Amino acid sequence: MHSTRFNRPVILTRHAALRMQERQITEAHLLAVIDTGETRFKDAAHLWAFKHLDGRSDNLICAVLVLENAVIVKTVMHTFTPEA
């Protein structure tokens, strides 16, 4: 996978891959969240990307990301509520 937003490859941690499988989130869904979702940065390298995906009853879908030489996906959540 490759993120067009960040122009970097996307690497899934084992934990993220397991959560995606458990929550039926495809790579296409994940890329939509990463590349077109809303973002909130914790600092220059750590962020959340989240997006409502049509046809899902467990929205928002959120990816917890670390920006290094690649976009590292730490975990993937559903029914996410962003903090104010």
Image (cartoon, grey):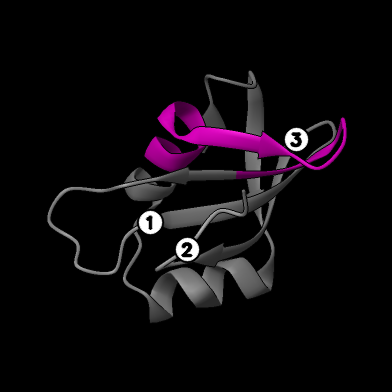
Q: Dots 1 and 2: beta carbons under 8 Å?
A: yes
Q: Which mark is residue 60?
A: 1
**Residue nearer the viewer, 44 or 21:** 44
Toward which corner of the image does residue 64 lie, by quadrant?
A: bottom right
Q: Position of residue 35 (x, y in %)?
A: 48, 28
Toward which corner of the image does residue 10 lie, by quadrant?
A: top right
Q: Position of residue 60 (x, y in %)?
A: 38, 56
Q: Residues within 10 Å of mark 2 (few under 14, many from 20)?
A: some
Q: Which mark is residue 70?
A: 3
Magenta residue check for 54: no
Q: Residues within 10 Å of mark 3 (few under 14, many from 20)?
A: some
For this orientation, the residue located farthest to the front is 84
Distance, label 3 to label 1, CA atoms, is: 24 Å
Magenta residues span: 31-48
Q: Which amino acid type corresponds to the residue marked 3 in the rendered image?
A: Ala
Query: Which residue position is annotated with label 2?
Result: 80
